[in-house]
Image (tube, rainbow, N blue to C red):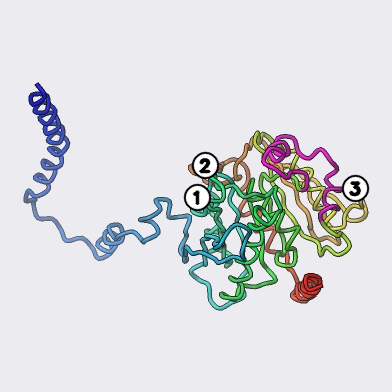
C-alpha cells in the first residue's frame, strides 16, 4: 500500500513539473523558427536595445527599488564605537551614500536615523534622501540599530544610561566624528534627521552632543525628558509629556551654556502611534533651547508666523529674519514619512516631500568651527576634572 501511494505521489509530481515546463519549451521552439529578412535596424535603435538589455548594477540586483540609491556610491560597513557596559565589542552598522558628482571635500553630511521595524536600506528607499543628495551635493549616513540590541530595531531613545540610549547616542556621535575625519566632510554642516524612535535618538543627540550638529529634523518624534522606560515611553508617545516641556529641558541641559539648535519638526495630524501633541511639546522645547522663551515658557524674543497651504499648517519662529524653529502639521497623515515612497512601510505619498522640506531648512544652518572647538575644550576640561 505504501509503495502504491509513493508511486501515485511521484507520478503527480512529474505531471506537475511537466505542466510547468511545457510552455517554456514551446516558447523556446517558436523563438527558434526562421523569420523573413527584415531591414537592418538603425545605430540609434541598436544602441537603445543594448542599453535596455544591459545587466543591472550591483545595487539594483540586490535591491529592486534601485532609484533610492540614485547614481552615487552606497557602502555598507561597521564602526567600532566606544566600549559600552556589557559589550566586549561595540560595533555600529551603517550605510553611507556619497553622490556621484562629489569632488573634493567639504560636503555637508546628513545623519538619518530610522524608526522601529526599519533598517538603513528601507529608510533610504522610502525617504528618497539619496536622490536629493545627488541633486544638491551632500553625503548621507544611515546608522542602523542591531537586532541584538532590540528585536524590532528600535533605538532606546528614552533611556540615556550608558548601556542603552546613552551608548547608542555616543556610538552615532563617534561614527559622525570618524566619517568627518576620514572623508573630509564639512564639520560645520553636519545635520541630524530621524523618524519616530530615530527622532527620539536624534533629540537625545541634540541635547548631549550639540557641538557636532548644526541643526536637527524630527519627524513623528516623541517629546523629550519624561520617559525612562519602555512603559513610560509608550505613555509619552500616546499622550505627550505630562510635565512642563520647558521644565524637562531645563532639567537636562544648562540653558546658559547650550549653543542652540535650529530644528524642523514634522507630524501627521492623524498619527495614532506618536500623538501630534508631542510635536507641539517638542516645539516648546526647541524654543527654550534656542532662547525664544524663558523658564516659564513665556516669550522672550523673536517672532512667529503661521501659514496654511495645501493641507499643511506651518509655523515658523524667526529671529532677525532668520528661521530657527519650524513646525509642520500635515493633514491626513498618519505615522509615516510625508511625501515618501508608500510602497515601503512607514512612508506615505500624502503631504509635502518631507525630505526636500527638511533639506531646504537644514542647508541654511551652520555650526561655526570656533564654537565647536570652544565647546569641545570645555567638555574635555570638565571630564578631566
What kind of element bears circle 1?
helix
Residue bounds of the magenta highlight: 225-252
Task: Report whether residue 310 is seen.
Answer: no
The location of residue 376, given as percent across then percent down, is: 76, 72
The residue under label 1 is 122
Crowd around label 2: few <14 · some 14–19 · many ≥20 (10 Å): some
Q: Quadrant of the N terminus?
A: top left
Q: Are marks 1 and 2 in contact (CB under 8 Å)?
A: yes
Please report the residue visible at 84 percent of the width from the left and 41 percent of the height from the top.
243
Report the residue at 63% width, 52% height from top. 194
Of the numbered discs in the image, which one, if any, rests on residue 345?
Answer: 2
Q: Earlier in the sequence, mark 1 or mark 2?
A: 1
Splitting the image into 4 quarters, where does residue 12 fall? top left
Q: Is residue 165 above or below residue 185?
A: above
Tell me: 165 left or right of 345. Answer: right
Instruction: State the residue in front, 362 or 110.
Output: 110
In the figure, 176 relative to 300: above or below?
below
* In this picture, residue 255 sits left or right of residue 384: right
Give the dominant element type of the magenta stretch: helix, strand or loop.
helix
Which labelled disc corresponds to residue 297?
3
| Rendered location of residue 280, percent (x, y) | 78, 43
- What is the spatial separation of the Cα atoms under label 3 and label 1, in whole angstroms? 39 Å
Amino acid at each position: 500500500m505504501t509503495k502504491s501511494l509513493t508511486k501515485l505521489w511521484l507520478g503527480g509530481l512529474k505531471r506537475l513539473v511537466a505542466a510547468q515546463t511545457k510552455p517554456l519549451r514551446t516558447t523556446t521552439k517558436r523563438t527558434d523558427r526562421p523569420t523573413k529578412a527584415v531591414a537592418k535596424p538603425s545605430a540609434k535603435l541598436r544602441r537603445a536595445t543594448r542599453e535596455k538589455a544591459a545587466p543591472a548594477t550591483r545595487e539594483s540586483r540586490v535591491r529592486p527599488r534601485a532609484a533610492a540609491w540614485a547614481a552615487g556610491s552606497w557602502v555598507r560597513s561597521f564602526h567600532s564605537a566606544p566600549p559600552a557596559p556589557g559589550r566586549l565589542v561595540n560595533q555600529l552598522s551603517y550605510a553611507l551614500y556619497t553622490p556621484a558628482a562629489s569632488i573634493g571635500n567639504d560636503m555637508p553630511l546628513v545623519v538619518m536615523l530610522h524608526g522601529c521595524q526599519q533598517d538603513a536600506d528601507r529608510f533610504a528607499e522610502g525617504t528618497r534622501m539619496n536622490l536629493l543628495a545627488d541633486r544638491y551635493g551632500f553625503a548621507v549616513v544611515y546608522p542602523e540599530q542591531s537586532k541584538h540590541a532590540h528585536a524590532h530595531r528600535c533605538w532606546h531613545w528614552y533611556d540615556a544610561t550608558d548601556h542603552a540610549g546613552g551608548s547608542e547616542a555616543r556610538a552615532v556621535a563617534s561614527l559622525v566624528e570618524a566619517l568627518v575625519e576620514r572623508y573630509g566632510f564639512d564639520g560645520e554642516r553636519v545635520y541630524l534627521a530621524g523618524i519616530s524612535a530615530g527622532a527620539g535618538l536624534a533629540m537625545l543627540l541634540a541635547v548631549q552632543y550639540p557641538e557636532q550638529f548644526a541643526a536637527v529634523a524630527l519627524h513623528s518624534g516623541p517629546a523629550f525628558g519624561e520617559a525612562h522606560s519602555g512603559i513610560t515611553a509608550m505613555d509619552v508617545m500616546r499622550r505627550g509629556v505630562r510635565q512642563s516641556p520647558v521644565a524637562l529641558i531645563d532639567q537636562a541641559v544648562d540653558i546658559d551654556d547650550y549653543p542652540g539648535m535650529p530644528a524642523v519638526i514634522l507630524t501627521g495630524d492623524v498619527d495614532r502611534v506618536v500623538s501630534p501633541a508631542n510635536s507641539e511639546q517638542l516645539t516648546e522645547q526647541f524654543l527654550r533651547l534656542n532662547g525664544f522663551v524663558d523658564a516659564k515658557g513665556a516669550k522672550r524674543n523673536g517672532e512667529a508666523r503661521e501659514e496654511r497651504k495645501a493641507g499643511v499648517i506651518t509655523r515658523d519662529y524667526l529671529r532677525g529674519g532668520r528661521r530657527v524653529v519650524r513646525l509642520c502639521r500635515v493633514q491626513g497623515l498618519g505615522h509615516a514619512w510625508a511625501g515618501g515612497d508608500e510602497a515601503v512601510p512607514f512612508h506615505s505619498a500624502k503631504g509635502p516631500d518631507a525630505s526636500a522640506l527638511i533639506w531646504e531648512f537644514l542647508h541654511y544652518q551652520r555650526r561655526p568651527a570656533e564654537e565647536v572647538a570652544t565647546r569641545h575644550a570645555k567638555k574635555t576640561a570638565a571630564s578631566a576634572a
